[in-house]
Image (spheres, grey):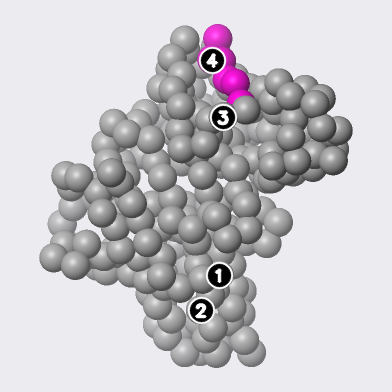
Amino acid sequence: AQSVAQPEDQVNVAEGNPLTVKCTYSVSGNPYLFWYVQYPNRGLQFLLKYITGDNLVKGSYGFEAEFNKSQTSFHLKKPSALVSDSALYFCAPHRPGYALNFGKGTSLLVTP
Amino acid sequence: NAGVTQTPKFQVLKTGQSMTLQCAQDMNHEYMSWYRQDPGMGLRLIHYSVGAGITDQGEVPNGYNVSRSTTEDFPLRLLSAAPSQTSVYFCASSVTLSGANVLTFGAGSRLTVL
């Protein structure tokens, strides 16, 4: 069975502070790891992905994610949050050849 | 390049009515899929297709039918709508399912079943 956990329904952070959105997964093999973002009343957009190599992956809008194989985690991070980062964030481990399942999502609220 | 186009954007149905949510992509993607998004439930996979003529069930397929007669189109059919099918539906496509390909999502279709 494949599963993905985003333990926090909501993350609140003040503008300018660092942010972390957590994701752990249980997927057979060596899955690719994705983060997608959904801004209010919009569809989902790709943010970043990990395939192999360096455990720190950089993506769009200043976001990065850290892959930890031993903890099967892929936490999303940003050094300095912006109010415009407020959105719903989805983690998605992808086992090649299998359909993509998403976590339940974490709502990020950045306050001025 | 239109990407993934979903129609309609909004729809209200009565219980027992049928309808089809349309999804079309112009990127020659092999893989297409349908998700529903409900508060607190995240995105749940309904059906998916890895190519024309091939479909498979996802996590929550009951009450929905799909077909894939062309590469471009992947319609989702509700044969007898129920209030539990009130949701926002997203169609998504990617080049293939075998690589680390990015999913391209449509803008969504909001369905209300009374």
Please count the marks in the image: 4
Q: Is residue A77 above or below residue B61?
A: below
Q: Residues within 10 Å of mark 2 (few under 14, many from 20)?
A: some
Which residue in the protein does label 3 denote? B62
* Front label number (1 vs 3): 3
What x and y, as percent, mark residue B21? Answer: 70, 28
Q: Residue at x 38, y 52 (%)?
A: A92
Q: Residues within 10 Å of mark 4 (few under 14, many from 20)?
A: some
The one nearer the camera, B30 or B79, is B79
On the same chain, marks 2 and 1? The answer is yes
What SS does tag 1 mark?
strand
What SS does tag 2 mark?
strand
Q: Is residue B90 above or below residue A92?
A: above
Sequence order check, earlier mark of 2 and 1: 2
Query: For the magenta stretch, what is the residue range?
Result: B64-69
> In this view of the protein, can residue B24 be seen by the observer?
no
> In this view of the protein, can residue B53 be seen by the observer?
yes
Instruction: Please name the amino acid that badge 1 sits on.
Output: Ser
Q: Residues within 10 Å of mark 3 (few under 14, many from 20)?
A: few
**In 3D space, how far apart are the residues under numbered discs 1 and 4 (Cα atoms)?**
34 Å
**What's the chain of the residue with tag 4?**
B
Left or right, A82 with respect to A77, comes to right
Instruction: Please name the amino acid that badge 4 sits on.
Output: Arg
Please tell me whether residue A45 belongs to the stretch shown in magenta. no
Q: Residue at x 55, y 70 (%)?
A: A107
